[in-house]
Each structure stands twice: as structure tokens, then as C-alpha cells.
Image (cartoon, helix red, strand yellow):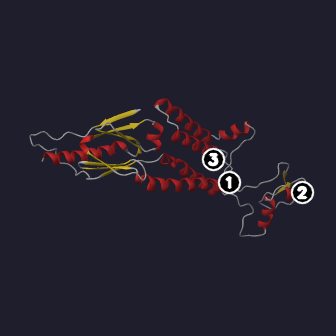
Amino acid sequence: MSTTTTNPPPAPAASGLYPPAGPRSPREIKLVSHSPIFYWWPIWALGFVLALITLVENHRLAVIPADAELRYDTTAAPKDSTQYVLTVPGDAKHQTKSLDRAIEATGKKEQPTFRTRVSEKAWMGPLFCVVLILTIVITNVPLRGLWSFLVLLLFVVLALVFSVFNVWEDLLSAFGNLHIYINMAGYLFFAVTVLVLWIVSVFIFDQRTYMIVTPGQIQVCEHIGASVRNFPAESVNFEKQRDDLFRHWILGFFSGDLIIHVANKEEIRLPNVLWIGWRLEEVQQVLREKATVIHS
């Protein structure tokens, strides 16, 4: 855990010397506290990527009974093509409708024989599931310290290695052919749903939990719908925490939890503030500007 306490800078000495001239600091800084759903961006990002791969491959899915038999038909196959013969014992109409719909679509040139797009790559489904589970764990279970970061990183590396070297095919075959296949609509459903929730949360609801720093005053809104509280700048100091290396440093773009210590011993917490390090530097510029104005 990395903890840093930052106090407002003292006013310049009574000698009347001012800080060296530099770029003018902004007169208002707003720090927004985000909800944990902000860290779910890998789910919708990976979902769109895998859906695009499935679309480009353009492979289709057919649902057939378990006792169906398939063989090559070398006698009636046209030139430069391969013909298969599918045999379904019993009454096929009572077992699956996939083939009936395919036969109906075959006579219609504007419709593909099989409509459902799915990739034949065995690593795509397991990779998406691993990323989904890790994201849920990371954003809901506090994992502190370097060892937790290394363990999670090991899982991610193993998932990528298994995908690159096609280990998922053999691994899942060893467990009774429990392959995980997700069609393009499945990836898009997850990606679009999570993206909409992510946009609404990040750009609408999260914007109502914030801290605004102006020269001489700090305004804090801790919860959605709560009243805005004002504090003089001289009565507060700040502490930034980065407890979870994987969440704050990788998924959170160097985010951290901000703790505001008020003179009356009260603590106000604003979790998941993005780029908290350099944002606090901007806050110090505003407070330094206030100190200079007071001295003059």
C-alpha cells in the first residue's frame, strides 16, 4: 500500500519574496470519484474485439442431434468443392430445427444457410470468461500487496500463453470436450450492455461525487444527492492511497483513493480518483496561489 499525505503549502516568508514566475495555475480543480464499474472497461473492449474477429472469420454454427453421422460424398461432389452427407437417425424434425431452417434458407439467395456466426478458435471463449471473472474479482475483492498483484498477473499471462499457443483446445478436450464457444451476438450483448452501463456511470452518475478546489475553499460532495460541503483550504490536508496495484495502476490508469482530513478530525473519502498523483499537484498549485494572494 502506498500512502502519501499532502498538506497545503505554507505562505511565503515575510520578506515579501514571491514564488518564481511560472505557468498560471488553474483557478478551479475538480476531482471526480468513480464507482468500481469504471474498471470494467476490459470487458466491453475485449467483447468488441472478439466480436470483430468472429465477424471477419464468418464461420457459422449448426445445431444437430448427438447421434448424427457425417461423411464425405465423393460421388456427387461438384468440381472444386467438397460435399458432405449428414445422416440423422429417427425423426429429425423432433430433434432439431436448425437443419430445417437451413434447408429453407438454402433456396433463398439473400439469406445464408446458417445464420449464427461463431469462431472455431477454441481460445476466444475461455479468454473472455477469464477476463470477465478476473475483472469481477479485482473490482469487488480488495487485493493488497505485491503478491496479490503477481498472482493476478500470472493468471493473465497464462491465459494469453494458452491462447497464443492453442493450449485451450487440448486442455478442454482433456476435461470431456468442455469447450466454451460464444457466438458473435453473445460477445456484442456483453460488450454493448457493459459499455452503456459504463458510459452512464462514468459520465453521468460519477460526476456527482466530486471535490472542487478553488483558491481558499474546497467543496466536497460525497454521495449522489448529498449536499455540497465547503471547507477553508487551511483546515484540510490530503492523503492518497493506492492499495491495489492491479486495479489502481493497470485497470485504473494510475487512480487512487483520496482521503481528505479536516481540522475537526473528520475524514472524507473519495475512492477511485483518476490520475490522482498529478491531479494533486494541480491542487497544490491552486493552494499555493491562494497563499501568495494572502501574503500580498
Q: Which residue is drawn at 87% across and 54% down?
A: 88
Q: Where is residue 53 in the image (x, y as percent from the top left)?
A: 61, 54
Q: Where is residue 244 in the image (x, y as percent from the top left)?
A: 46, 36
Q: Residue at x 59, y 56 (%)?
A: 52
- In this picture, residue 231 sits left or right of residue 196: left
Q: What element carries label 2?
A: loop
Q: Name the residue under label 3.
A: 124
| Comes first in the chain, label 2 or label 1 | 2
Q: Position of residue 71 (x, y in %)?
A: 84, 52
Tell me whether the residue at label 2 lies in contact with that at label 3, contact meaning CB atoms closer than 8 angstroms: no
Can the viewer see residue 124?
yes
Q: Quadrant of the N terminus?
A: top left
Q: What element carries label 3?
A: helix
Spatial separation of the CA atoms under disc 1 and disc 3 = 10 Å
Q: Position of residue 228 (x, y in %)?
A: 35, 51
Q: Residue at x 66, y 58 (%)?
A: 58
Q: Which of pointers 2 and 1 indicates the residue nearer the eye?
A: 2
Q: Which of pointers 2 and 3 indicates the residue nearer the eye?
A: 2
Spatial separation of the CA atoms under disc 2 and disc 3 = 35 Å
Taking depth in this image into account, of 76 and 214 the one nearest to the observer is 214
The quadrant in which residue 189 appears is bottom right
Give the residue type that dot 3 points to.
Met
Taking depth in this image into account, of 144 and 180 the one nearest to the observer is 144
Q: Mark 1 points at which residue?
A: 118
Give the residue type that dot 2 points to.
Asp
| Comes first in the chain, label 2 or label 3 | 2
- In this picture, residue 108 sits left or right of residue 12: right
Q: Is mark 1 on a helix, strand or loop?
A: loop
Give the residue type that dot 1 points to.
Val
Taking depth in this image into account, of 65 and 107 the one nearest to the observer is 65
Residue lying farthest to the top in this orientation: 147
Q: Mark 2 points at which residue?
A: 91
